[in-house]
Amino acid sequence: MITRAMTAAAIPFARSGYEVLIDFSIPPQFLGTARKIVKDLPLNYVVIRPSLSICEIRAASRVEGRIIDYASYRDFYGLFEASPIPAVCDNEADAGTVAMRIYEGLGAGKFVVA
């Protein structure tokens, strides 16, 4: 319900000419629903997915919201491995490099949801 509401709330901004970014953990299984919600608007889907071990390390080393036992999140992580659109997977790159890959991929149509 939350994901549907966020997607629907973005439509007036997109129709007004704004570039809209929804930054949330949205599994690829939602893409069919998202496509129906946004109808004729362009839709891109970008998954930034470091390895499971890196996610576990980062979650355990947070100052706030620390996740010591990542076991309950492993199945959720696995949902993103089934993406029909290539993910940005890199354990070493800095944020600027990842952002450039996303920018270039968007320009090349790499993340388009048909």
Image (spheres, rainbow, N blue to C red):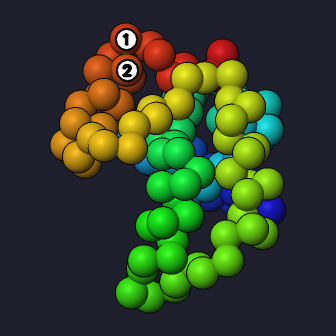
Label annotation for residue 105? 2
Which residue does the image show at 60% across and 81% down from the upper left?
68
How many residues crowd mark 2 within 10 Å: few (<14), some (14–19), many (20+)? some
Most distant residue in the left direction: 96
Q: Which quadrant is the N terminus positioned in?
A: bottom right
Q: Which quadrant is the C terminus positioned in?
A: top right
Which residue does the image show at 75% across and 68% down from the upper left?
71
Local secondary structure at mark 1: loop
Q: Position of residue 70 (x, y in %)?
A: 67, 70
Q: Position of residue 109 (x, y in %)?
A: 44, 13
Residue 20 lies left or right of residue 83; in this view the side is: left
How many residues crowd mark 1 within 10 Å: few (<14), some (14–19), many (20+)? few
Q: Nearer the viewer, residue 52 or 43?
A: 52
Give the CA separation, mark 2 to mark 1: 5 Å
Q: Which residue is mark 1?
A: 108
Q: Are marks 2 and 1 in contact (CB under 8 Å)?
A: yes
Label annotation for residue 55? none
Q: Nearer the viewer, residue 52 or 79?
A: 52
Instruction: Determine if residue 43 is in view.
Output: yes
Image-quadrant location for residue 33: top right
**Which amino acid is tagged 1?**
Ala
Q: Position of residue 28 (x, y in %)?
A: 71, 37
Which residue does the image show at 68% across and 35% down from the upper left?
81
Instruction: Determine if residue 15 is in view.
Output: no
Residue 69 in the image: above or below residue 30: below
